[in-house]
Image: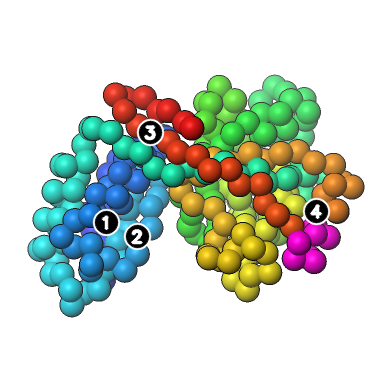
Amino acid sequence: MTWCGEGYLSVQLYDQVDIWSVTGVLRLQRQLSQSDIASAIVATVPGWTTLLLWLEPGMAGPGAVETAVRQAVADGSGGHLEFESRVLTLPTIYGGPGGPDLDFVAELNGLSAEQAVQRMEAPQFAGMVSFSPGMANCMWLDAQQALSAPKYESPRTTTPPGTVGLGGSSISLYSVATPGGFQMVGRMAVPIYQPRPTLTAFADSPTLLRPGDRIVLRATGPDEFAAIRAEVERGSYRYRIEPGRCRVADGELAWT
């Protein structure tokens, strides 16, 4: 545990990044929401292997917080866990101006561009939403479908919002214009962050994606991409979001 000022505590749970580390972080998040310090927690920020607590300093002292975290980690080790895992389909155009690095990524993985796109369409698991508002980092649910590519040697000074990037074997969904070093393989037709919402999907939160979501980056062509963008501009686009859950038990994951 590391204190990051008076009101923030970072809890490092794992050294290795995989789907199990993410579910472990979500488990700790749930345990703390039911702990003695729950009323002192303003918000939590799950990462690949960490959980950041934003705390109201006057409501729980450092010793009480650290004791509660240790107890939650101990209580949460093993056992069953079930959490919401929605399935969101995000139409994406691959290659071209929005994905200039697609051919490079395909060649690195010994695939044609079409085969690389098929791999990109395989379901992803949102491990964390961070770095920029609404920006999601994801991993393949099926590791055999994963692509890999190095990051840029010199990062870009800006990346268009909606860019789908690949760095290592992680997918990054850029929510706003920001510097970045992931290989640009495509661009989503729809936003994943709206601080001034015009679409109903953002009525409750400016951030569309949540840790634990499953994401399908469905390939679309130029005409459909343009038509969807027009719907977004009119405020009439409806996201395809299906309810679902993930259950962790006996060392296995089950999705519904």
Q: Earlier in the sequence, mark 4 or mark 3?
A: 4
Location of mark 4 (residue)? 228
Residue 159 is at least partly visible in this image: no
Q: Earlier in the sequence, mark 4 or mark 1?
A: 1
Q: Are marks 3 and 2 in contact (CB under 8 Å)?
A: no
Location of mark 2 (residue)? 44
Location of mark 1 (residue)? 33
Q: Is residue 231 magenta?
A: yes
Identify the amino acid type marked 3. Answer: Arg
The picture places residue 213, in percent across and down from the top left corner, at 51, 44
Identify the amino acid type marked 2. Answer: Thr
Give the residues drawn in magenta, as a range. Answer: 228-236
Q: CA distance from mark 4 to mark 3?
A: 34 Å
Residue at x-position 35% and y-position 46% = 26
Q: CA distance from mark 2 to mark 4?
A: 33 Å
In this rendering, the answer to whether 6 lies above or below 103 is: below
* Corner quadrant of residue 195: bottom right
SS class of the residue under badge 3?
strand
Neighbour class for label 4 at 10 Å: few (<14), some, many (≥20)?
A: some
Q: Are marks 4 and 3 in contact (CB under 8 Å)?
A: no
Location of mark 3 (residue)? 247
SS class of the residue under badge 1?
helix
Residue at x-position 66% and y-position 29% = 119
The picture places residue 153, in percent across and down from the top left corner, at 61, 47
Q: Is residue 230 magenta?
A: yes
Residue at x-position 23% and y-position 62% = 38
